[in-house]
Image: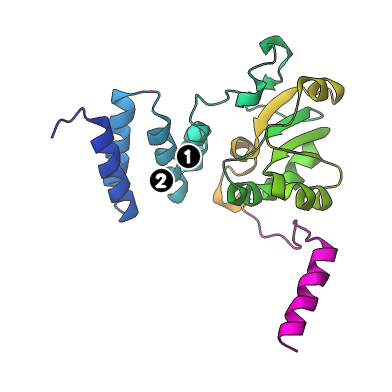
Amino acid sequence: QDPGDVPSRLSLAGLQAAQGEWELARNNYNKVTELQPANALAHTALAEIALRSNDWTAGWQAFGWRFGTWPGKPPHHFNSIDPDRQPKRWDRGSLRRTRLFLRAERSPVEQVLFTDLLPDIEKESRHILLECEPRLVPILQASFPDIAVRAAGTVTEDELTEQRVQIGSSLGDLAARYRQRSSDFRPRTRPWIKPDPGQVAALRAEYQACFP
């Protein structure tokens, strides 16, 4: 086998990771990044292995590759916006009194998982404009009424200007600020996601009708 065959090495590393052979998988993913420094798949896999091992610093740093591009690159729908008019990339510094744009995560599951960070971000920042999976918009808007929630890919240059957005990032990237050690993963005393009361009532009625 050609040691420089990246697809084969990625496949091998994926199988090793699936079997819990984390060190073997890590070694192969590291080899891929040596051969292809911009291979987002390998970087993301290394991030996930590091996070499983509670190596938060290395994990969050590499997790920025999860969108398939260089970390910090704006979402695709910002391509039509002049770079000088786009929000500045978060530099891992303080968010005190900043006005933020947070891009959608890769999936609804990740989006819901990382909303655990929103109360912390709200306390530090001045304003948040958040994009997410369209189906989650009403849920997140009801759960976080002070946050402007929009469907992924819909925020425009006009809205960025109107809301005076200064910094662009994502929930997954901001985890590097708020979840730097295992003790930062604190249990919540109350749920942060609020279900729609109308849908709750309708589902309860439907269930009770089927199982009186």
Colour theme: rainbow
Closest to the observer, 182 or 176: 176
Dot 1 or dot 2: first in sequence order is 2
Q: Is mark 1 on a helix, strand or loop?
A: helix
Q: Foreground: 19 or 97?
A: 19
| Magenta-highlighted residues | 186-212
User: Which residue has dot 2 on it?
Assistant: 49
* Residue at screen point 58% across, 42% down: 180
Depth order, front residue of 50/161 = 161
Residue 179 in view (yes/no): yes
Report whether 2 appears left or right of 196. left
Is residue 189 one of those drawn in magenta?
A: yes
Quadrant where the image shows the C terminus: bottom right
The answer to whether residue 125 is seen in the rendering is no
- Which residue is disc 1 drawn over? 59
Q: Position of residue 88 (x, y in %)?
A: 69, 19
Q: Estimate how packed mark 1 is, as few (under 14), some (14 to 19) or many (20 or more) residues with alpha carbons within 10 Å.
A: many
Question: Do the numbered discs 1 and 2 sit on residues whose CB atoms are within 8 Å?
Answer: yes
Name the spot of residue 146 as percent of width and height, x first.
86, 43
Tag 2: residue type?
A: Ile
